Structures are given as C-alpha cells and as structure tokens.
Image (cartoon, rainbow, N blue to C red):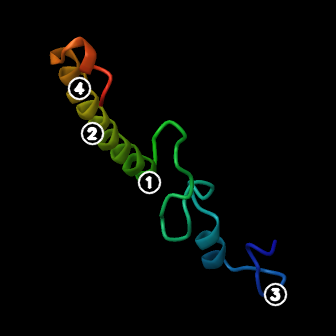
C-alpha cells in the first residue's frame, strides 16, 4: 500500500492509481525506462569489457606470432633466447 499511497491518506484517486499501476510495471520504471535487462542480452558494460579483451587478445596473438616466426628462422643454438 505504501507504493500506491505513500502519504497514508487511506485512498487514491484514479489518476494516482493509473500512474502507479500500468502495463509492464514490473519491467519498466515510472518514466518507461527498462528496469530488467534480459539475461541473454549482454549489457553495454559487458560489451565494452569484452571489446577491450578482444584488443588485448589480438595484441598478444600478434606478439606470439612474431616470437614464433623469429624462433622458426633462428639457428638451433639461438632459439631459446627471446
């Protein structure tokens, strides 16, 4: 009842009632913004973090490729001096 009648008047008029009780009210706030993100859709923060990881992985792969190419072109005695 505190949600519908925060002032403890004991009643609410139709305007107050329809403002608080509306379709999708469990999924949207009072302004129509989403309050629940689907668990199968990653959030913007998650996507940004994963994008940074991809850049880090690409850099690491590039560095490893350089090491392997250098190792493949070296003489047997010099191969283990990175």
Q: Which mark identifies residue 65?
A: 4
**First-in-chain label (2 vs 3):** 3
- Residue 66 point in image, percent of width and height: 20, 29
The residue depicted at 45 percent of the width and 48 percent of the height is 46
Q: Secondary structure at mark 3?
A: loop
The residue depicted at 30 percent of the width and 28 percent of the height is 81
**First-in-chain label (3 vs 4):** 3
Q: Quadrant of residue 56?
A: top left
Nearest the viewer among 82 and 7 is: 82
- Between circles 2 and 1, the one closer to the viewer is 2
- Residue 63 point in image, percent of width and height: 26, 34
Q: Secondary structure at mark 1?
A: helix
Nearest the viewer among 68 and 44 is: 68
**First-in-chain label (4 vs 2):** 2
Residue that mark 1 sits on? 45
The residue depicted at 63 percent of the width and 55 percent of the height is 26
Gap in Å between the C-alphas at discs 4 and 1?
30 Å
Residue that mark 2 sits on? 59
Nearest the viewer among 45 and 73 is: 73
Gap in Å between the C-alphas at discs 3 and 1?
42 Å
């Amino acid at each position: 009842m505190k949600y519908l009648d925060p002032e403890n008047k004991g009643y609410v008029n139709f305007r107050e009632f329809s403002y608080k009780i509306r379709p999708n009210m469990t999924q949207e706030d009072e302004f129509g913004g989403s309050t629940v993100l689907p668990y199968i859709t990653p959030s913007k923060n998650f996507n940004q973090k994963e994008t940074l990881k991809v850049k880090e992985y690409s850099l690491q792969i590039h560095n490893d490729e350089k090491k392997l190419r250098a190792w493949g072109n070296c003489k047997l005695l010099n191969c283990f001096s990175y």
